[in-house]
């Protein structure tokens, strides 16, 4: 006898999701995982159309999807993204705020534009998307919003004051928004990945990999699908009583 946390085989059938930063890495895994559970998925990508088209092809083998080029820091772009998603599938019921960038430098050397670009994409982008979908979700009295933060929001990281500040801001934003919409059938949660096996970590030196792995109690990286699995649960009806939470998926790196 098999067991599933979900009450049916297509637990997200009829749900319409937007995944920002959906053309690669964690965003790609999330988009494909949501599709595999029956959701219609709109992926937002900033520049790499070839990657987006490849992910879209995979999505359409599982459910239905579209891809929309979007700068999440630009409200006009965000409005266009949501308009296209609604024309294709109807009201957005799942929002995954995954788009993010890094631009590292020690704080004494960090330029103002490095600070602004990271804060604007990671934190303001989360605000832009969330605010833009909430009105429709409130009318439906249903919604799932999952924001991607990071363990650096808890522990900081050398050369990433901008990124750490943005990701810590997302945690506060998540809690505040969750309180505002809790009576409307909308949940708002965050996921804080640790070190994830992506193209970036593959390019690290062996010495860098050794240092990182020694800091992780489980002695291994997360996979993108470790992150995506948690997103899918939080996006489901089964997670209806979880809101305002930040879930660390980090192999024990941050234990609080």
Image: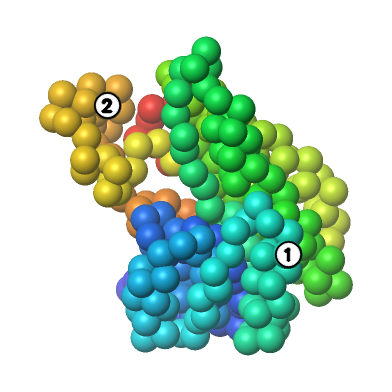
Residue 256 circle label: none
Q: What's the colour scheme?
A: rainbow
Q: How dense is the environment of label 2, judged by Cα within 10 Å: few (below 14), some, or many (20 and up)? A: some
Residue 159 seen in the figure = yes
Q: Earlier in the sequence, mark 2 or mark 1?
A: 1
Quarter assignment of residue 246: top right
Residue at screen point 58% across, 64% down = 70
Nearer the camera: disc 2 or disc 1: 1
Q: As drawn, which residue projects farthest toward the left?
A: 206
- Residue behind mark 1: 76
| Along the viewing direction, whichever of 181 and 61 lies nearer the viewer | 61
Q: Position of residue 35 (x, y in %)?
A: 46, 76
| Along the viewing direction, whichever of 100 and 36 lies nearer the viewer | 100
Q: Position of residue 87 (x, y in %)?
A: 68, 86
Left or right of residue 180: residue 58: left
Residue 212 circle label: 2
| Along the viewing direction, whichever of 88 and 256 lies nearer the viewer | 88
Residue at screen point 44% across, 41% down = 193
Circle 1: element type? helix
């Amino acid at each position: 006898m098999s067991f599933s946390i979900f009450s049916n085989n297509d637990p997200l059938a009829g749900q319409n999701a937007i995944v920002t930063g959906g053309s690669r890495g964690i965003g790609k895994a999330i988009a494909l995982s949501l599709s595999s559970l029956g959701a219609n998925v709109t992926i937002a990508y900033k520049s790499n159309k070839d990657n987006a088209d490849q992910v879209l092809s995979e999505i359409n083998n599982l459910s239905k999807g579209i891809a929309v080029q979007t700068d999440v820091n630009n409200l006009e772009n965000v409005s266009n993204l949501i308009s296209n998603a609604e024309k294709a599938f109807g009201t957005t019921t799942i929002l995954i705020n995954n788009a993010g960038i890094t631009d590292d430098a020690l704080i004494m050397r960090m330029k103002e534009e490095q600070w602004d670009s990271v804060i604007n994409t990671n934190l303001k982008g989360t605000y832009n998307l969330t605010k833009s979908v909430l009105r429709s979700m409130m009318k439906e009295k249903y919604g799932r919003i999952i924001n991607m933060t990071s363990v650096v929001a808890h522990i900081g990281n050398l050369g990433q004051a901008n990124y750490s500040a943005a990701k810590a801001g997302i945690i506060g934003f998540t809690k505040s928004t969750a309180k505002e919409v809790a009576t409307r059938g909308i949940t708002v949660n965050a996921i804080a990945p640790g070190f994830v096996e992506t193209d970036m970590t593959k390019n690290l030196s062996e010495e860098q990999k050794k240092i990182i792995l020694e800091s992780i109690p489980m002695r291994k990286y997360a996979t993108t699908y470790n992150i995506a699995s948690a997103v899918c649960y939080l996006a489901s009806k089964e997670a209806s009583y979880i809101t305002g939470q930040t879930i660390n998926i980090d192999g024990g790196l941050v234990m609080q």
